[in-house]
Image (cartoon, rainbow, N blue to C red):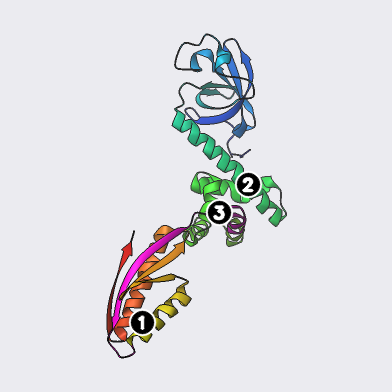
Amino acid sequence: MPRKPKEWPERNELVIGTVTRVNPFSAFIALEEYGNKEGMVHISEVAGKWVRDIREFVKVGKKVVAKVLSVNKEKGYINLSLKRVRKYDAEEKIREFKREQKAEKMLGILAKKLNISLDEAYEKVGFKLQEIFGEMFKGFQSSLTEQGYKFLIKEGIPKKYADLIRSVAEEQLKLKEFDIKGEVEIKCYKSDGVEIIKNILINAKKKYKIKIKYISAPKYRISLTTRDAKTGEKKLKEIMEEIVEKIKEANGEGSFRMVK
């Protein structure tokens, strides 16, 4: 289960847990994010309608998302509500929990690479990622882009750990790729103009690993596959601008535009 540097939930926080006991007027939930500390849901906080039998709504072993109403650390009481949790918020909390489980698995792999315990890995990396991104998973995911990797280092993650975070993320995550497209229109009026255009495009293709598709003279489709859509769009514009500049240097003319 994902560890957190705090031991107790806060009022109004959404928590996830498993129902452990059900009494006629209450249910008890083990909070997985907080060392299985038990929280209690009174029958009046189970559903937004009259509840005749609490067991119709909560069963032992069921995983639920609850809202924290109050916390008494001295007495060890955590009062919860099920009826005050919106369906969308519950679904997002479950998704977040699953992401953190995945993130802890990745942190475990990182710990093995460093030959340290999982607790030490939390101290060195995990809690810092939670602090920066709100959750560890986003930290691992962000490291897959050059901008995100640099941001880790900027935020104080040592390069040694940033490299490992990215390495583990590349092994464990499949980041969505974006196909950024543009169109260039280039002309060259020299006798060998066709060859000049051909060479400019071939060199750009090799240099930037882009795809080029002939549409109809003088138009060509240029596409770039990237994991970072914003950076990719900027990069493609620079590539197309370079192609146009080179054709102008050869006494030709050209223009470019982005394509949705």
Q: State whether residue 75 appears in this view.
A: no
Give the camera-side residue of 175 and 200.
200
Q: From the top left corner, tell me how far across and down residue 241 is, in percent.
A: 33, 73
The nearer-to-camera label among 1 and 3 is 1
Q: Secondary structure at mark 2?
A: helix
Question: Which residue type does callout 1 highlight?
Answer: Ile
Mark 3: amino acid? Lys
Residue at horizontal 58 percent and vertical 14 percent from the top? 55
Asked if residue 81 is among those painted magenta in the image, a careful observer would answer: no
Q: Which residues are magenta?
A: 166-192
As drawn, 238 above or below 68: below
Q: For this rendering, which residue is in front, 227 or 128? A: 227
Query: Does the segment drawn in magenta span residue 176?
Result: yes
Instruction: Check disc 1 and report the residue beneath it.
Output: 197
Instruction: Measure the alpha-carbon separation of dots 1 and 3.
Output: 37 Å
Could you tell me if the residues under marks 1 and 3 are in contact, i.e. CB atoms within 8 Å?
no
Query: Which residue was labeled with disc 3?
Result: 174
| Front label number (2 vs 1) | 1
Per the image, the residue denoted by label 2 is 122
- When asked about the image quadrant of residue 245, the answer is bottom left
